[in-house]
Image (cartoon, rainbow, N blue to C red):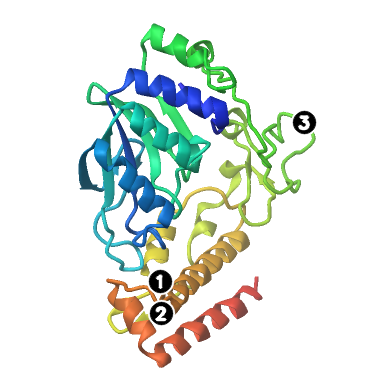
Amino acid sequence: MYITSDPKDKVYKDLLDLAFSECEQFILVVRQNARQGDIPSETMNNVLKGLSTFLIEKKEQYEWPGTRLWSGRDCFGRQQKPALVYYYRTQDGAKKILLDAANSLYSWLQPNLLEDLSFIKKQKPWLISTSHERQAYFETDDEYEIKKIESIKGLEVKTRESIRKNRPKVIYVNDPLNLECVFCKGNLHEGDIAPERSFVCMGCINNGLAICNVDRRIFDPQKINKDDLRIQDTQTLKIGEFDLLEYINKDFLDRKGGLCSKKCFHLFYLNQCIKHLQTYLNLASDNDETTSEIINEIRNNEVNQYILKNKIKQLETIKLIY
């Protein structure tokens, strides 16, 4: 059962009242890879201090309810750190702190607060939230619990009936995306240009209609020559022993769909290369410490920075061919 809009104010309070009455534990998370996550804000420190009385344990984890982090290194060579997951008892004093610190479920977000407020019942996740994605859902089939969830006034959820029929009644609040399928409306056809941020339902996708990620043209993926969706001129940029574009090239070897022509495929490829190299430059220009050898090589060598910038200019020039 999914929550379809951020529970705020009294809805948030009523939701916590129910969660505290049903569950024995709740968790809060600090992501150590967050840009400001290693330096807790004053508000976060106050929350941690206030909740210390109710702390059961603190663990370093790559996975917690609703989220899984990659362990090892990311595509920029940075060592990924596990998150700090705090487990607390659901007692009234703890609930007061949660209510005083935030006025909605998705307000639990770094750097101001800890993240992903979730509840555990009998050692199993019961209410899971992921603040960055603004998603939350209940893991329960208990009829009595579902009735109590549905009785919270103002809490927008997918009903049991809609889940059974696989037609969830979702209320979208302040969502700029046009959620009416552009094809079902009957106004657009193959070859037309779709408006920005258009929505395509699964039925139309299954019927072979798609919107190109580059020029927004409506096309039938079955009519695309697969040989056109291959890199003609593979881009590389070596700094020391590292090829900065190796990750992008591997990604495009298996890329399928979303692009309507040879031209769009190569423009998309070049744009991704530029974006990837620009990210290296941005990371190298930060003062944050990093475990990435390649980022340190760029940061500490002006020649490498020049090579990167020059490659980006070269790729921008190649784009003009298309």
Can you say which quadrant of the picture contains the N terminus? top left
Mark 2 falls on what kind of element? Answer: loop
300 left or right, relative to 277: left
Q: In the rendered view, would you say 165 is above or below 100?
A: above
Disc ID at residue 213: none
* Residue 233 location (% of width, % of height): 48, 73
Q: Is residue 10 visible?
A: yes
117 left or right, relative to 170: left
Between the C-alphas of marks 2 and 3, the distance is 46 Å
Q: Which residue is mark 1?
A: 245
The one nearer the camera, 24 or 97, is 97
Between the C-alphas of marks 3 and 1, the distance is 42 Å
* Residue 240 location (% of width, % of height): 30, 84
Q: In the rendered view, would you say 174 is above or below 268?
A: above
Q: In the rendered view, would you say 320 is above or below 73?
A: below
Q: Residue at x 56, y 60 (%)?
A: 265
Q: Which residue is mark 2?
A: 237
User: Which of the 4 image quadrants contains residue 187?
Assistant: top right
Disc 3 residue type? Answer: Gly
* Residue 2 location (% of width, % of height): 48, 25
Q: Which residue is mark 3?
A: 186
